[in-house]
Image (cartoon, rainbow, N blue to C red):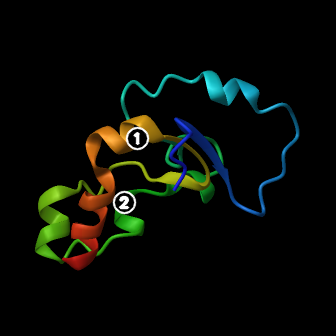
Amino acid sequence: LFPNLDKVVFLDDDVVIQRDLSPLWEIDLEGKVNGAVETCRGEDEWVMSKHFRNYFNFSHPLISKHLDPDECAWAYGMNIFDLAAWRRTNIRETYHSWLKE
């Protein structure tokens, strides 16, 4: 989608920016495709209680085989995508194969 970019900062339309976001550009994702804020650590019990079990159907054998229900979910409204890692890992095809399953 963005062949000339190596990184993208994605923000939902309801995110309010209160300061300069340029430090996000300097975060080293260490080869990971996505960086985001986890939603299972923090003081707000409702906001910070989101684990994979809140979002996935673990009665499905494919899900229960590959995912941990206690793993932290992430705040979907702000993500950093390392597009170079995205291309290297061929994650688009992996995502599409999961969708087909």
As measured in the structure, the alpha-carbon distance from the residue carrying label 1 to the one carrying label 2 is 18 Å
The residue that appears at 21% across and 68% down in the rendered structure is 97
x%, y% of residue 8? 60, 43
Q: How many marks?
A: 2
In screen coordinates, is 60 left or right of 17?
Answer: left
Q: Residue at x 46, y 41 (%)?
A: 83
Which residue is pictured at 33% across the width and 49% down the height? Answer: 71
* Quarter in which the C terminus is drawn: bottom left
Between discs 1 and 2, the one toward the N terminus: 1
Q: Nearer the viewer, residue 90 or 12?
A: 90
Q: Position of residue 65 (x, y in %)?
A: 11, 61
Q: Of the residues shown, which amino acid type is indicated by label 1? A: Val
Q: Which amino acid, mark 2? A: Phe
* Element class at badge 2: helix
Residue nearer the viewer, 12 or 95: 95
When asked about the image quadrant of residue 29, the answer is top left
Q: Residues within 10 Å of mark 2 (few under 14, many from 20)?
A: some
Q: Is residue 13 left or right of residue 63?
A: right
In the image as oriented, which residue stretches furthest toward the right? Answer: 18
Residue 25: horizontal and vertical position, in percent? 64, 28
Q: Which residue is mark 2?
A: 52
- Of residues 19 and 6, the one nearer the viewer is 6
Q: Secondary structure at mark 1?
A: loop
Task: Please tell me which residue is depicted at 24% across the width and 54% down the height of the picture.
Answer: 68
Q: Which mark is nearer the camera, 1 or 2?
A: 1
Percent position (x, y) of residue 76?
57, 57
In this figure, which residue is indicated by the disc labeled 1? Answer: 33
